Image (cartoon, grey):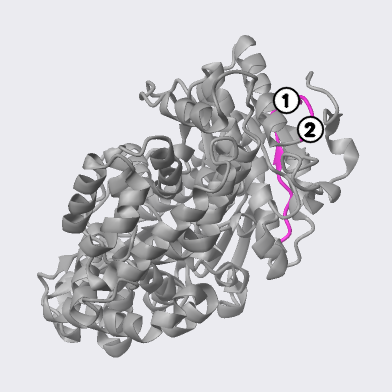
Amino acid sequence: MSVPQCRINYESDLNEEQLEVVLCEGGPILVLAGAGTGKTRTLTYRLVKLLDRGVPPWACLLLTFTNRAAREMLERVSHLLGQYPSGLWGGTFHHVCNLILRRHASLIGYKENYTILDREDQKTLMDACIKDIAPDDPEMPKPAVLVEILSVANSLCLSPEELLERRYRKLLDREDEILKVLNLYHTKKLTQNLMDFDDLLINCLKLLEEHPELARHYGGRFEHILVDEYQDTNPLQARFVDILAGVHRNLMVVGDDAQAIYSFRGASIENILRFPERYPDCRIFKLTTNYRSRPEVLALANEIIVHNRGQFEKALRTSRPHGPKPVVVRVYDTRMQAGIVAEIIERAVAEGLPLSEIAVLYRAHYQSLEVQVELQARGISFQVRSGLRFFEQAHVKDLLTYLRVLYNPYDEINWKRLLKMVPGIGDVTTQKLWQLIQQSHDVFQDLKQKGPRMVLPKARDAFNLVLAQFDEILKMDYKNRPEDVLEYVLENSYSDYLYHAYPNAESRYEDLLQLIQYVRHYPVEQGPHNKLELLLNDLALERTEEEEVGTFVSLSSVHQAKGLEWQLVILIGMNEGRFPSKRAILEEDIEEERRLFYVATTRAKDFLYIIYTVTDNGFQTLKKSRFLGEIPKDLYEEVFLDDRREF
């Protein structure tokens, strides 16, 4: 298909930096696109210009990280051209690999009509493998955990053994069984003609590397290759791109090393930093004109990132008018922090700012707990972009189950949830135990005397441990100190269950520590109701109805906020050990944390507040983040509210 010549005035549609990229000749090209500098626009116009020059659509390849990004760019291209460029390949790495494998999968032992497993399918297949290898082992990790282990190992280019040693040491007692299950999982996929998402990239690479004639064919077809968000590529994706670009070498990668924040997913910043080493003849372009933020926000952001050594130096600038300086606020504790967040939001709304233009950002999900509670209490609508609302999360509900059955020993839902957490107890045994509880006048005593006889031998030890825990819990002042129950259960049994049952166990553990702190400092007024009763009533009455789209404040981790923007951004929890995280400090991986801080601040268009606390709700003294100490004080206003409540 030939594309009609476009009547586009590139000079008027693009700034000088963007125009230089769009009009440049071929060869290896690295485009360093700062936050808010029109990266998507530049990439789109570059593709249009190639087609305008007469490059056939089928000779162009566009690689993105999300289907949404690919659709958006291809829609813009179609609009500019006046028609869809039929034959152009554009999409995610998985999409493009799938297109190649559908034509040649037989060369690596698959049939071309293979089935792609989604995440639920993966867990179902993994469960079948567990039942084949260790059918009577109640301590085996759940399928979701093994799927996560395999995926993380693939993205980091590690063997499962290496990953278990590095990140999953709590599971090393089951290493032999885990490896057998994972090997069986691979075997079943091949024999049943199945591929998961990771296989699409791994098998496509295998295909191209084992069959050089195919590498030459596709490398010869794609005369021009454009890659979006290159800083987020992992080593496998970078190899895939290098193979396809090996014939024509007309490769343009666009990214921002200052926004490389996904190493935990396997992304390697070295791909972008060492691009000039792999392509010594590459040309480097920088997009530095930011269209998002006011000068005051950019001045602070530039000073954050300048402290990183591993980077391409660039300073963002803007033509937007001046506005207020960012504000750094010191408060006493996280409850006060939540109150200040709510006041900032209420004041902004009163001045005409819509809720949809306000975001509260944080390093880790658990940091949003008190903010969620405060916004709920004040009737401020919010949406949690970083996952479920705090108290709706499965692991939080698991731990609270112990409090709920203490408060109401005839609570069927929570007893069944608790019993199914016991290794080896399934639906049948749970129902038998529930019938015992229903008919009992002394639930805990009858469970202790009659319950073990109803439990299969493989589950009896674990069940007796739960009964022994309740013996200890019932000796506690659990009605007035429910936090002691949560702490006891977490440290004596639930932490092990967490690592065996859930992916992302470490972040979930942090959530539960924050839950305990929240309950410990839960305010109790004088009256007839004890702390346990008040707490559970408040949780039950928490509003859960859905709000209309666009009518809520966004609550998000910084990772989830990348690529988004708001007029007002409030960044909370800027304390040492929180941001940067404890793990980053221990592993001396501070530069990625600093990039994460940079990403957070560059989400703000007009107003930026950064808040840190003096204490962790009186539990321990906290230091402000080292990153705040790196910023010249004349770039922000500082407010101290740790000894008063007014703002």
- Kindly report which numbered mark, 2 or 1, lies closer to the viewer in this rendering: 2
Residue 123 at x, y percent in the picture: 25, 64
Instruction: For label 1, count other residues whose C-alpha is less than 10 Å away and answer few (under 14), some (14-19) or many (20+).
Output: few
Q: CA distance from mark 2 to mark 1?
A: 24 Å
Q: Amino acid at mark 2?
A: Val
The picture quadrant where one finds residue 636 is top right
Which structural element holds mark 2?
Answer: strand
For image coordinates 43% across by 46% down, the residue present is 402
Tell me where the magenta segment starts and ends, as one range.
311-332
Residue 278 in the magenta stretch? The answer is no
> Badge 1 is on which residue?
321
The percent position of residue 514, horizontal first and vertical second, equals: 59, 46
**Is 415 placed above or below 457 here?**
above
Residue count near mark 2 (Cα–Cα under 10 Å), binned few <14, some 14–19, many ≥20: many
Q: Quadrant of residue 526?
A: top right
Q: Closer to the camera, 155 or 16? A: 155
Of residue 296 and residue 571, the one placed in the foreground of this image is 571
Q: Amino acid at mark 1?
A: Pro
- Magenta span contains residue 316: yes
Residue at numbered disc 2: 329
Where residue 310 appears, x then y in whole percent? 71, 67
